[in-house]
Image (cartoon, helix red, strand yellow):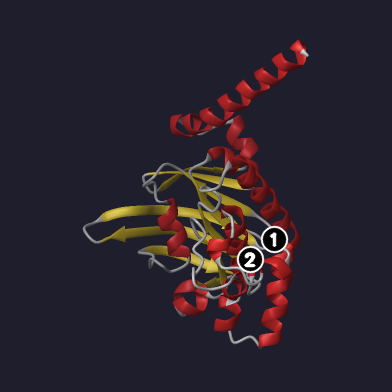
Amino acid sequence: MILQVDQLAKRFPGGVKAVADVSFTAGAGELVALVGESGCGKTTTLKCINRLHEPSAGRVLIEDEDIQGLDPVAQRRRIGWVMQGDGLFPHMSAAANIAVGPRLLGWEAGRIAARVDELLELVRLDPAIYRDRLPRQLSGGQRQRIGVARALAAGPHLVLMDEPFGALDPITRDGLRADFSELQARLKFAAVMVTHDMAEALLMADRIAVMEAGRILQYDTPSALLAAPAGETVARMLESPLREAERVGALKAGAAQNG
C-alpha cells in the first residue's frame, strides 16, 4: 500500500477540530477523492499528509513508513503536489518549473534535461515549443499541464492534488482529467485529490471519501456510493450531478426524436 491514513486528527489553537478520525488508503494506480463543502476538512487532511500541518493524532504511513519519523522537507520531496491554480514560479520557464524537484534532489543536469523533455511529452506539450516559455505565455490548461509535470518530475509514488482542475474551462478540464487518468494508469502512482465537485470525483476516483465537519461520512467506490448513499448529506451531494445527467439525457433523447 502506498498511503495509509489511520484515525487522523487535526486540532488548531483554540480547540477547533478540523479533522477527526479520518482513515483511508490509496494503493498503486489508485485515486482517492476527498469530497465535501468548504470547511469540511478535506484540504486540511491533504496538508497533514504532506506535513504542511502537523497531525494532532493518528498515523500517516507512506509505503509502510510512519511520516512522523521522517524529516518534513525530505518527505515533501518524495511526494508530488498539484495545487489549486497552477502555482508556477512566474519568472521561471516551463522547463525550470518542472526541474525544481530534481534539482533539489541533486540530479545531474543531463538527467534533469532529459526528464523535463520526457514529461513535457507525457503531458502533451512539444518540448521544442514549450520548454522555454514563461507561465504568462501559456494558456490556463497549458500551465496546469506544467504543474502536473512538475509534480511527477522526481518520480513520486504518491501525488496530492488540491482542486487541480477547478479553475479551467469545461473542455480543457475534461481533457486534462482524461490525460491525468491515463498518466496514472501508465505510471502507477497513488493519488489523493481534493475536490468540491462530486461529478469530478465520480468520473475520476477509484474510491471517494465524502466529508462533513472533519469526518468521513462515507468511503466507497463511485458505484457503491450511487447505489447506497449513507445518509442525507451524501445523497444531497449526489443530486446535482445525477440531475444534470438526467437533463442532458432527456435533451439528447428529444433531439434524436426530432431529428
State whether residue 195 is above or below residue 153. above
The mark nearer the N terminus, 1 or 2, is 1
Task: Check the image and name the residue furthest to the top.
Answer: 258
Left or right? Give the position of 43 relative to 226. Answer: left
The disc labelled 2 sits on which kind of residue? Ala
Q: Residue at x 66, y 55 (%)?
A: 30
The quadrant the C terminus occupies is top right
Q: Tell me if I can see residue 70 in this picture.
A: no
- In percent of width and height, residue 169 lies at 57, 43
Label 1: how many Cα within 10 Å (few below 14, some 14–19, many 20+): some
Q: Secondary structure at mark 2?
A: helix
- In percent of width and height, residue 119 lies at 70, 68
Residue nearest the viewer, comparing 90 with 204: 90
Residue, disc 2: 149
What separation in Å lies between label 1 and label 2 (alpha carbons)?
A: 7 Å
The quadrant the N terminus occupies is bottom right
Residue, disc 1: 123
| Number of numbered markers | 2
Q: Secondary structure at mark 1?
A: loop
Q: Tell me if I can see residue 138 in this picture.
A: yes
Q: Residue at x 38, y 66 (%)?
A: 53
State whether residue 207 is above or below residue 54. above
